[in-house]
């Protein structure tokens, strides 16, 4: 069993009137199977409304399945006795960094979650330092979080989660409100946590560029998993991706068009340097 498993997961938002009669049913997750293995970096891609956030909310048991099952490190999220274990195992990072700031000094903010878990003070300071170093924010430890850039705030939020020592972090569009520099900082940080600290990562995004370094990519559309594979496999299927309203990275698109026009370029080009190499191999 993996770190995160969903089996035949169905989730319906049910709206009722005052008398409790069902007014409408919106099936946001429609029979989804997902596995994220320990240590893996998995990305979920999908257009707005495809069910990504609903999926994320199942992983820390904010929502529980209408049908099917979700396990986090083998714990069924329907098991209420396990809810705190589950939430400590899978840390969540959300879209808006401002909503995640609690304290007026960075290091206090980072220690807050661990303190709530009852971690001894000395151990907290050790973890705060380690976590801030891991996200490249140690030199800001005594700063006010409010004065940081969006990308820096998001890295502080990630450090706060790391200080709770989760085995897995789930990030729900952590870069959606950031500028391109902030987006790069955050993705870089997440990649390094995965590689160096061996944290299992589930990154939810609608930016295709951010999934290049993932081990596996899952594409969702209308509550279903519609594509699954390595970034290279997924990026080879340009026309399908467009059908799911996902914007392909410029370099992948250019390679795709060149290939369509008869140039001998391999499928699934991910970076500029790969394209340069492919073109020079032709010449
Ligand atoms: N609280 C809610 N009540 C009713 N429907 C909802 C609620 N939250 C999301 N939905 C619907 O569920 C579907 C999936 O939404 P969501 O999981 O937020 O998608 P994404 O994160 O990919 O944009 C959409 O049709 C959305 O309108
Ligand atoms: Mg969402």
Image (tube, rainbow, N blue to C red):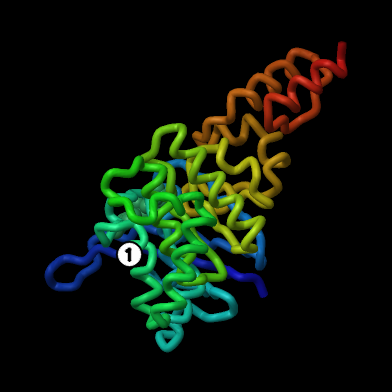
Q: Position of residue 170 (x, y in %)?
A: 49, 60
Residue 65, quarter of the rendered image: bottom left
**Could one spot residue 51 in this view of the protein?**
no
Residue at image location 59% in from the left, 35% down from the top: 241
Q: Position of residue 66 (x, y in %)?
A: 42, 71
Dot 1: within a 10 Å radius of its alpha carbon, few (fewer than 14), some, or many (20 or more) residues? Answer: many
User: Where 271 falls versus 10 (above or below)?
Assistant: above
Quadrant of the image for the C terminus? top right
Q: Is residue 82 above or below residue 230?
A: below
| Residue in view at x 49 percent, y 64 percent | 162
Give the percent coordinates (x, y) of residue 30: 49, 59
Q: Residue 198, percent across and down?
A: 64, 63
Q: Is residue 188 visible?
A: yes
Is residue 282 placed above or below 62 in the rendered structure?
above
- At mark 1, the secondary structure is helix
- Quadrant into which the N terminus falls: bottom right
What residue lies at 55% left-to-right and 61% top-to-bottom?
Answer: 32
Residue at position x 41%, y 59% in the image: 54
Q: Which residue is mark 1?
A: 108
């Amino acid at each position: 069993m993996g770190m995160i498993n969903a089996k035949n997961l169905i989730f319906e938002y049910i709206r009722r009137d005052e008398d409790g009669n069902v007014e409408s049913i919106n099936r946001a997750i429609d029979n989804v199977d997902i596995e994220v293995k320990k240590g893996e970096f998995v990305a979920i891609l999908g257009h707005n409304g495809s069910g990504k956030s609903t999926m994320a909310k199942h992983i820390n048991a904010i929502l529980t399945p209408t049908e099917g099952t979700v396990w986090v490190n083998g714990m069924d999220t329907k098991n209420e006795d396990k809810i705190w274990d589950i939430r400590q195992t899978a840390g969540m990072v959300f879209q808006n960094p401002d909503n995640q700031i609690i304290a007026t000094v960075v290091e206090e903010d980072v220690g807050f979650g661990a303190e709530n878990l009852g971690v001894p003070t000395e151990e907290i300071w050790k973890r705060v330092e380690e976590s801030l170093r891991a996200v490249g924010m140690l030199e800001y430890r005594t700063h006010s979080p409010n004065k940081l850039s969006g990308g820096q705030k998001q890295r502080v939020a990630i450090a706060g989660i790391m200080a709770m020592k989760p085995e897995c972090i789930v990030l729900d569009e952590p870069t959606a409100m950031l500028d391109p520099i902030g987006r790069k900082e955050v993705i870089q940080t997440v990649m390094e946590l995965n590689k160096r600290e061996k944290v299992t990562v589930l990154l939810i995004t609608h930016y295709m560029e951010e999934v290049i370094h993932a081990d596996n990519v899952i594409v969702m559309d209308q509550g279903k998993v519609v594509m699954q594979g390595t970034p290279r496999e997924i990026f080879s299927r340009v026309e399908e991706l467009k059908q799911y309203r996902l914007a392909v990275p410029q370099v992948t698109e250019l390679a795709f068009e060149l290939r369509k026009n008869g140039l001998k370029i391999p499928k699934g080009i991910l970076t500029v340097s790969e394209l340069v190499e492919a073109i020079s191999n032709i010449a």
